[in-house]
Amino acid sequence: MIIDAHVHIGKSARLQISADGEFLVRVADDLGFDKICCTDLTALFYDMHEGNRLLYEEMRRYPDRIVGYASLHSTRFESEALENLTRCYEVYGMKGLKIYSTPEASIAEPWTIPILEKCVEFDMPVLAHTTPAECEYLMTRVPQCKVMMAHAGGQPFAFGDWNRAIMMAQRFENLYLDTTSSTLDAGFVEKAVAVLGADKIVFGTDTPLLDPYMQRTKIAETRISKEERELIMGGNIRRLMGIAA
Amino acid sequence: MIVDICAYFGKWPYWPIDACTPAAVVEELGHCGIDRAAVLSTRGLFVGWEEGNLETEEAVRGFPGRLVSFACLGPLELSHTLQGHIFDFDKLCARGFLGVRLYPQYHTYHPLYEPFVDQILEEAEMRQWPVLLPLRVIMNWGMPSLSLDWMVAIVERHPRTPWILSGINYFHELRAAVSLMRRFSTVHLETSCVQGFNAIAKLVEQCGSDNLLLGTGLPLQNGSANLQKILRANIPEPAREKILGGNACRLLRLEGSQ
């Protein structure tokens, strides 16, 4: 089973994208992906209540294809964020949490901690758009939380530093790396597998922001074993999110 | 014939690269299904462009059917000495270099305020040498990058020089490149850092396919993934063939060009 663990649904002015479930499922069909794990852009960047509800509607339209991440635009909403996360888990059936971090609103702050503790309680992995240093802050405080470092350091705020991301994931048992990235540096996947093992690496595409064929090829044609490739391209996220066949 | 207009060989000082020799790069090209690549030595970026050009020349001599050479050019003087030498463009031609690459972000100069840059660009116009100017060498946010405004300004100053814009990623960068390509038929875009969803199809729709060139950034970037975005792009087959190699053959006057 191939699962894309990093897909965006909805609309973002900053990212200049707009995609509904129908479009994303059609793209997944073209790519041969069985399931896509989606975050709603309105929830991520504007209003968690509205965005997560919209994602729930798309999940109901495509229950066998779309897996939902609850998304929070900022953990600074504290109890309101906790309540929305609980609703996403208990009512909407979402299986993970996506949080975004920027220099002006970092998630490496005290109010993120109760959110991560709630994720531990719900056994929800967290796809965190963070830098390796931010991950260090989070993992030292809630080491039992399963955190996937989105883009494995290969994003602007982390300066493309996947070497540091690998080092950080080596330090923390529950820190995973997401391969989604506009960085295409040769050797990244091979090194991550060699240092961390394939079971700590999760495949994603960032559809509809990035070209998913490139992201797929990055894993599909990497010089790793078939078993390692299967873990990265679906086995790991399936285990982390408890996704049924 | 599939031609990669933007490849390298040599050491990468930021992290280890498996395929750093010319032979290893040729093997990688074969693995990806790419017939030929325009290369230069990364020594030219980090140590000295003349030393790098010597290595590039030697690499192409070793693999004449697989590699073609671009000369790396940069400042003529060292910071602690007077100007030591001049560009010998005839000699560069005789040595088989088919184009020029400039790396202001690695050679610490401002492309708009250095007379040697204008000298190179005027010479390139006269000889119809393509000049590759990278916004960034690879699509990694931590690497040095050039100002987009500088890139646009230098192209506008030398609109008859054959340009290859390189290292362009998405959003405003891509739109600036599209704008330049629409205004000047001399401006080309290589694809090694273009990453957006449907980006290649959009580029073809906006600018046609005559000025788009496959670039991979091998061996610093993943060559197969960069090739796939052209192979899988929703574009007409003749356009794909041009991007994969036809345009590069024409621009570099390689065998097989029409």
Image (cartoon, grey):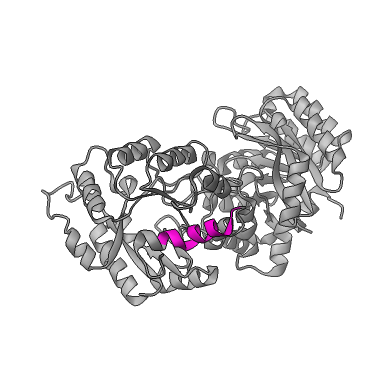
Of A220 and B164, nearer the camera is B164
Extreme-bottom residue of the structure: B62
Can residue B8 be seen from the camera position used here?
no
Q: Is residue B186 above or below residue B218?
A: above
Side of A197 where A121 appears, left or right: right
- Residue B224 showing in the rendered view: yes
Q: Is residue B236 above or below residue A139?
A: below
Q: Position of residue B152 (x, y in %)?
A: 36, 38
Q: Is residue B13 above or below residue A77?
A: below
Provide residue A20's location: percent of width, then percent of height.
Answer: 75, 38
Q: Nearer the viewer, residue A228 or A145?
A: A228
Q: Which stretch is magenta?
A: B235-248
The image quarter containing residue A229 is: bottom right
Side (left or right) of A173 relative to B238: right
Q: Is residue B193 left or right of residue A124?
A: left
- Find out whether residue B58 is within the magenta segment: no
In the shown orientation, is residue B115 left or right of residue A176? left
Identify the residue at image location x=70%, y=69%.
A226
Mostly what secondary structure, the magenta segment?
helix
> What is the total number of numbered labels drawn onto the structure image?
0
Query: Is-magenta flag for residue B240?
Result: yes
Q: Quadrant of the C terminus of chain B?
A: bottom left
Q: In the depicted view, which residue is nearer to us: A63 or B68?
A: B68
Residue A28 in the image: state x and y as whole percent: 74, 51
| Residue furthest to the right | A91
What is the x, y in percent for residue B193? Answer: 49, 50
* Residue drawn at x 72%, y 54% as measured from the top left: A30
Q: Identify the residue at the far front of this view.
A: B258
